[in-house]
Image: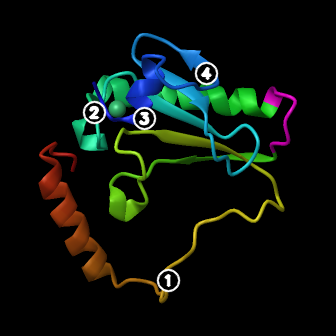
Amino acid sequence: MSACIFCKILVNELPASIVYRNESVAAFLDIRPVNRGHLLVVPNLHAETLADLPEPIAQEMMAVAQRLAGALRRANLRCDGVNLFLADGAAAGQEVPHVHLHVIPRNRDDGFGLRLAPGYGTVSRREELDAIAAAIRDATGLGLY
Ligand SMILES: [Zn+2]
């Protein structure tokens, strides 16, 4: 038996307010919403990090999130905008170790937002940006450039 709360939701061992489900992903309401209608899109298989997730399932998570963002705007909820947010790893704020994409309805005055680190706003030197880009490019193994 999995100790993962999202896996338990997916096998109906824990309750959830399910909005959508197909063969690879499910979406349900966050029990601690930022705003009413705050959704989580999760893979049906247990994967802790984005890197653990098969790419077609990651693509399906985004496709479902796109449809849900549209639904939030059409539903009878306050929704002036939508944020998609995925915390990959504890250092990024991931609290449940099962990949999940937040679909968060936003209102102009809801007070939610990302807190910027001290020193944010400094424009980086081009040489530094190019060196970082090269390091990431090399790590992709994709030959992107
Ligand atoms: Zn899980």
| Magenta span main SS | loop
- Residue at 57 percent across and 24 percent down: it is 15
* Disc 1 packing (10 Å; few <14; some 14–19; many ≥20): few
Q: Amino acid at mark 1?
A: Tyr
Looking at marks 1 and 3 on the same chain, the residue that comes earlier in the sequence is marked by: 3
**Measured from the top left, where is residue 145 in percent x and y?**
21, 50
Looking at marks 2 and 3 on the same chain, the residue that comes earlier in the sequence is marked by: 3
Q: How is the rendered protein coloured?
A: rainbow
Left or right of 129, for residue 76: right
Report the mark closest to the observer, 4 or 3.
3
Name the residue carrying label 1. Answer: 120
Left or right of 139, for residue 22: right
Q: Which residues are magenta?
A: 74-79
Q: Residue furthest top?
A: 23
Report the mark closest to the observer, 4 or 2.
4
**Disc 3 Cβ-to-ligand 1 distance below 8 Å:** yes
